[in-house]
Amino acid sequence: MKPSIPVLAATGLLSLAAADPTWPAPTDEMEEIVFQLQGHRGRLFSDLITPCNNEAAGPGRVTASEWLRVAFHDMSTANRYFGTGGLDASLQFELKNGENTGPGHNTTLKFYSNYLSTRSSMADLIAAGAYASVRACGGPVIPLRLGRIDATSAGSPGVPQPQNAISTFRQQFDRMGFSPTEMIQVTACGHTLGGVHTDEFPDLVPAGTGVHGQVGLDSSVAAFDNKVVTEYIDGTTQNPLVVGPAVRVGKHSDFKVFSSDNNATMKAMASPEAFQNVCRDVLQKMIDVVPAGVVLSDPIVPYTVKPVDMQLTLNAPGNMLLLTGSIRVRTTNLPAGSIDNVVITWKDRNGGNNCGSSATCSTTSTLQGVATGFDDTFGFFPVSALIPAAQGISSFTVRINLKDGSFQDFDNNGNSYPMTDGVIFQKPQSCLLQGTGALTAVALVRNDLKELPVRLGVSYLTPRNTANGNPVPALNSADVAMTQSKCVGQYTFFSASFTIPGGLSYNARVSVSAGKGETAVTDDFNHAGSLGGSCLPFAGGLVCGSSGDDSNSTVSSTASAATSTQTSSVTQTTTSTSTTSSIPTPARVPTLGDYRLLGCYTEGAGVRALSGAVFAYDKMTLDSCMANCTGFDYWGTEYGRECYCSNSLHPSSTESDQNECDMSCAGDPTQFCGAGNRLELYMTTATRTSSATVPTPTGTLARKPTVGAYTLIGCQTEATASRALTGTAFADDTMTLDLCASFCDGYLYFGTEYGRECYCGNGLQPGSEEAPEGECAMVCAGNPLEYCGAGNRLELYRLTSLPASSVSSVSSPVPTTTTTSNPTPPTISPYTFQGCYTELPTGRALSAKSYVSETSMTLESCAAFCSEYKFFGTEYASECYCAHTLSPLSTSSPWPDECSMSCSGNSAQKCGGPSRITLYARDDILPPSPPVPTHPAFVGDENNEWEFVACRTDETQDGTRALGGQAWASGDGMTLDKCGLFCDGWEYFGTEYGGECYCGDGFGEGKGSVEVDEGECGMACTGDGGQLCGAGFRLSVYRRVHV
């Protein structure tokens, strides 16, 4: 990082932070998991421990305490004399050795497994879990170093047990590398959270005692505080490892340890400050115990500026590269509101400034979203830039422009941020079927590198299913040679296929490389779960070696050919003009194969004339349409690039003058392909069939009374303030009840929700109630014959041999649909088809406006309704949504399998599906720049007016809210005005974390809530991107205006 000295010297802007790591760094994946927790692109690593009293493994089990115990149990087999053991994830192989009792170890490791990869070892995740659990509960920031290596087998036994004598404890901790004083310290710090449970220690916690079978180790089981020390010293402790039945059976282990130096260490830790400082140091030592030969990194800190998910894609016809991703700026000490924009400037392939056909080698971005961690905030500035393929890119630098006119430059510690264009993982042409694991990977290799060996690398997880109950999947790798295919402009295509075993393909990472060893050029660690279910064709193509700037650069012989390809929700249209001196004259084709030309026919009156199947593409010919419609009695081409099939012609379609079908085929200018609302219609010359060639259902949609060892309970609501099932969760576009049941193996309950979500748990959280069966009406994304809940509704199953009282069976016919190899909806001018996209678990992917029509929804009517917006999408047969931007949380899904519902007003068209959107976009509308959120000076109206006061902390000394009157939360509709209305009658209101609203008449004297810099309230309101609604533990406070 090098600041611009002349400007900064004049403005007095101080350095934002110490130098960042040089990007990319081996710690980058873990850096995001640990620090980038909630909000935009949040990794959600802290979900199960936030708030600290979360009991994801069941009532009475504080998850944060279990995360901290896992780290200790994993570390405690260390032997400093032999250099073995330590924090190495060997615990996964030791769960049944008698030393590691209780479900917490299993559930914790299972949650961490969601983050396991070649760049995030299980051992590092266990260490990160210790850091996170302490911080989530108000403890100190434990310096976190990385680089741990996972064990491949169990370690030696030696976890301290409560019945041990003090001499044994001293020997065990000495083996780990801890002094007698440190033994006391780490025990006290580890026992400030959670408690002892009846299920594991009935002799210490008899049945019927405690809360949910737990007796706390101190009186604040969900706070990282010094009470475990002070209550022990003053004699008020109820710690079951100090007093009670444990004394009688000799298992009062905490007393043995704490008193081993006549309480000197405990007394030295008694003050809150001393306790926090001691625990910071001794817990760091605990997680830094590693086997000999393992070298840990320096403690990680968040980047000040970090490129995130930077990716190149070759746009059709091959002359331009699309650079996408985000620049993440740490806004902890530099408020997002003070940043005007971020500019990235790149160097060409040779390190120069040749921008080719682009006007400049730079692009400017404004704030798109914010994320938060325990101690940090981040702003994301999206990147989308076109780079001529002939010039390419080798690196870039970043400039942050501030609103006060100053700026700061970042050059990756003098190295610039590297960005190679030698090898590109071409995502639009790659695809993954998550159900079967079938992966097709396409890479582009620059022509000067194409003679090197090109390889596909896949790292993936497979369940172990071993007798020792190991919940952590095995991390595997595969290396596959890629096959060379066509050359387009500056690049050559390579492809390979691989079937990812194990059922966890969505967690796989994909790499492509050219060459070997240190000189290999790679595009690696691409998330397989981000791939669509179908590989898109690459439309058009330049002559091999062409830059795209010359007049003979395209393969097409037409005078003018336009191609459009979707890449990362950006559509780039390129027009190439050839020097062909004459344009071929199209002619009628009377017969083709087993079909004959009927003539030019109109579309139906409000319906498609041919309603069996639909295709549209830029290489349309009569021959390709006929091949698409194999098995149908009729087919016809329309508008130059559309193809329709059916076994009958709608009666409202009538014959027109042949000259009205005057458009040439997009893929063959010597043929006619209909016109607007006109079909070049062909009919079979073979014997007519009696019915359409349409697949029929093989079963009926119904409730499943049992799934494996689970029994249906019924339809259940989510809980009031959390998920009903808080054990673990995942989402998959191939969701079935069996898949969810398998994922939740070991839990008492599982439930499916919103068609594609799966939740597990050992108990239902407060507020979850039985709902009418009919409210769980969404079919499973991976099996249309099963129900998978609905929005805020769980299809709930319980592990029990007893029949559930609410089991019932409802069946209904499944609509017959026609599936084809690659059907594509027609162009709805000026919109073009983008694909099938997922809806959000909460909120909408397209959120500007919407309407519903149960009887007359068509793609055309939705397009007309959304004509002022860049995107429109249809969903669930009858719903229409519009927006200028598509939520980044919405991802591509297989077309047409998951957008298979016919539009309510036109059965020939597909209008999405359950939680799936048939998405269209237009190029002539640019989405408006996102509003820069602010704190309006006044909100409300003359009868309910409020004025902005300040940004305040919501951290109080007694654990209550700063504004304790009443509260309300909205995941997608919070605004300052709504919060003001909700708090009518109170003196103050405050908004927090974008979607929370709190009311009160004051903040309480001496509670600890204080005013802070306004920039710390940097999260936009969920219902109004132009307003600020606090941040994590930060309130945007307004006071009532009294007239």
Image (cartoon, grey):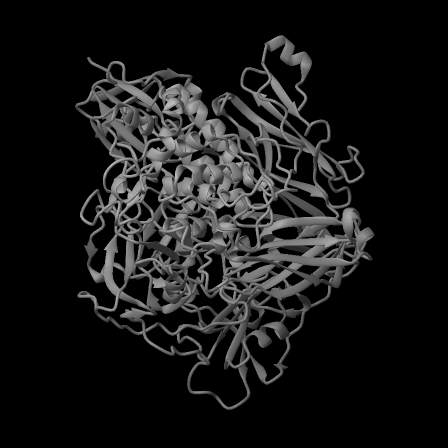
Q: Residue at x 30, y 54 (%)?
A: 762
For the C terminus, the quadrant is top left
Which residue occupies the foreground of this view, 780 or 517? Answer: 517
Q: Is residue 2 visible to the viewer in this orientation of the structure?
A: yes
Can you give x and y, in whole percent of width and height, for residue 961 in the image?
27, 26
Q: Is residue 37 visible to the viewer in this orientation of the structure?
A: no
Q: Residue at x 60, y 10 (%)?
A: 11
Can you give x and y, in whole percent of width and height, for residue 788 in the image?
33, 61
Residue 861, quarter of the rendered image: bottom left
Residue 1022, quarter of the rendered image: top left
In the depicted structure, whether residue 379 falls above or below residue 557:
above
For the N terminus, the quadrant is top right
What is the residue that sits farthest to the bottom in this orientation?
Answer: 687
Left or right: where 817 falls relative to 571:
left
Total number of numbered discs in the rendering: 0
Left or right: where 880 falls relative to 351:
left
Which residue occupies the foreground of this view, 1037 or 722? Answer: 722
Q: Residue at x 24, y 34 (%)?
A: 238
In the depicted structure, whether residue 275 falls above or below residue 369:
above
Can you give x and y, in whole percent of width and height, for residue 18 in the image?
61, 22
Which residue occupies the foreground of this view, 924 or 1020? Answer: 1020
Can you give x and y, in whole percent of width and height, for residue 131 in the image?
47, 35
Left or right: where 299 falls relative to 517:
left
Which residue occupies the foreground of this view, 224 or 835? Answer: 224
